[in-house]
Each structure stands twice: as C-alpha cells, then as structure tokens.
Image (cartoon, rainbow, N blue to C red):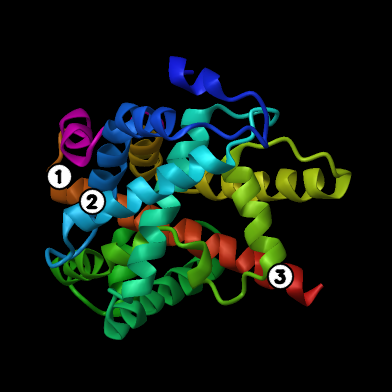
Amino acid sequence: MPTLARKFRGPTKKIDRRTKEKLIREYSPLIKFIAQKIAVRLPSNIEFDDLVSSGVIGLMDAIDKYDPTRDNKFKTYAEFRIRGAILDELRAQDWVPRSVREKAKQLERAHLRLEQQLGRAPTEDEITRELQITKDEYYDLLNQVKSVSILSLDEAGSFNSTDRKSILSLLESCKIPSPIAELNLKTLKGVITKAIESLPEKQRLVLSLYYYEDLNLKEIGEVLEVTESRVSQLHTQAILWLRRKLRAHFDDEQVK
C-alpha cells in the first residue's frame, strides 16, 4: 500500500485537504490507466478528458469512503470506485444507441439458442450460420457492439438492489460477516468461474491477460500473435457471454 494510504486510521477518519490532494496526484496514473482501458471500447466522439475527470471524482469518493478495517487494499478499492465513476458518467450520457443495444441482444439470444442446443459455448462458425451472416459481417457486428461489452451492473433490468450489492461486494473483495451474504457471494463466484471456464481457450486467455496481467489489446495481440482488432473481438465475445450468464443466473433466482 502506498505510503500516503497509511494516513487512514479508521472508517470515520477524516484526512486533510493537503493529504487528499497528494493522494489524487499519487493515483492519477491509475485514473489514466483505467480510463484508457475503457476508452478503447468507446466511440471516437467520447472525450478522453471527460473520462479522466470522472475518474478523479471516483478517486475522491474512494478516499472519503475507504474503510481500512475491511480486508481489501486501498488501491483495489480505488480502482473499483474510479471505474464505477467513469461508467456512471457514460450511462448518464446514454452514449450507446438503441440500435446497437438491440444488436447486442440479438447476438446474445443467438448464443443462448446454440448453447441450449449444443450443451456448450458455440464457435464463431456456428454463430454465423445461426445468424445467417458471413464471418466478416459477424466481426463487423462485434465491432459495433463492443461498447456494450463494458460490464454494466445497472444495464441488466433483472438485477435487483440485492443482486447489485452482492456483485459490488464481490468486486470490492470485502469481508461479509453475514453467513447468508457469504453464501450468495460464494454462489456468484461459482457462476462467474463456471462461465469463464466454459469459454474457448483464447477468450479465457484474453480475459486473463487483460484483467489480471494488465496488458493492453496491442500487447495481448503480440502474445497471441493476432491483430489488435482480433483481440477486441475475442474480448467482446467473452464479456457478452459473461453478461448473459449473470443475467440468466439472477433471472433463475427470481423465479425460485
């Protein structure tokens, strides 16, 4: 944990303005790093500086609300708050056209039909046959919907407030004292783990390199010996798959 983060002494500890400014400067590279990772999946009309500004607000929120008694590092908590603030701003702008959202839903529905028929994740060839489009048209479709692949908890209408809190707690890696909450988180982790394990090998590798090794799309392309565009397509497919799996899980829970 950075030296400045040691200023925290408890959940109600207030830090002075000068320390807050130093923390913002210390973590500004983190803001830009997260903003850049989000920006690669956004239309060109979205200003990068606006993402950074939202990220600063997220960092300030993290500084105000960080609880060192929880079992998570400040950097981890700050990353979550920065990303959340940026996504909140994007949702407020309603920057994804309705037509693009509909295409993403069509793609997810086709994926679901094939999964139910085959008992496994479908291949790209199987999806293109199902949609009756060429491989080039399929790749163009992925490029169009890649902005929707930013995993947004509030986009899923089937997520109730309890669902969202469970996912937020999981992402924040906090200790949850309630046995029921612990069971919910364990179940959710199982759903995500199983969904990732069911992905094709290259999609799993892209997720691992992108989210755990912090490589950018170009660097991942060099590792896999494919183009940056191809990495983006693999990432979009993987995230759309995980979104659908999470939505299906909570839909099933509501029926029970």
Left/right placement of residue 173 relative to residue 219 reads: right
Note whether 176 is above or below 230 in the view shown.
above
Mark 3 or mark 1: which comes first in sequence? Answer: 1
The residue at which mark 2 appears reads as 232
The one nearer the camera, 180 or 222, is 180
Note whether 206 is above or below 39 in the view shown.
above
Left/right placement of residue 97 relative to residue 171 reads: left
- Picture quarter with the C terminus: bottom right
The residue at which mark 1 appears reads as 228
CA–CA distance between discs 2 and 3?
Answer: 30 Å
Identify the residue at image location x=66%, y=56%.
Answer: 165
Crowding near pointer 1: few (<14 within 10 Å), some, many (20+)?
some
Q: Looking at the picture, how far across and down is residue 244, in whole percent?
A: 51, 65
Q: Looking at the picture, how far across and down is residue 27, in whole percent?
A: 34, 31
Tell me if residue 31 is in the magenta stretch.
no
Three-letter amino acid code at the position of disc 3: Asp
Determine the secondary structure under disc 1: helix
Q: Looking at the picture, how far across and down is residue 93, in whole percent?
A: 31, 74
Three-letter amino acid code at the position of disc 1: Glu
Three-letter amino acid code at the position of disc 2: Ser
Q: Is disc 3 in contact with disc 1, using a CB cutoff of under 8 Å? A: no
The residue at which mark 3 appears reads as 252
Q: Is disc 2 in contact with disc 1, using a CB cutoff of under 8 Å? A: yes
Left/right placement of residue 39 relative to residue 119 reads: left
The one nearer the camera, 50 or 195, is 50
Which range is magenta? 212-224
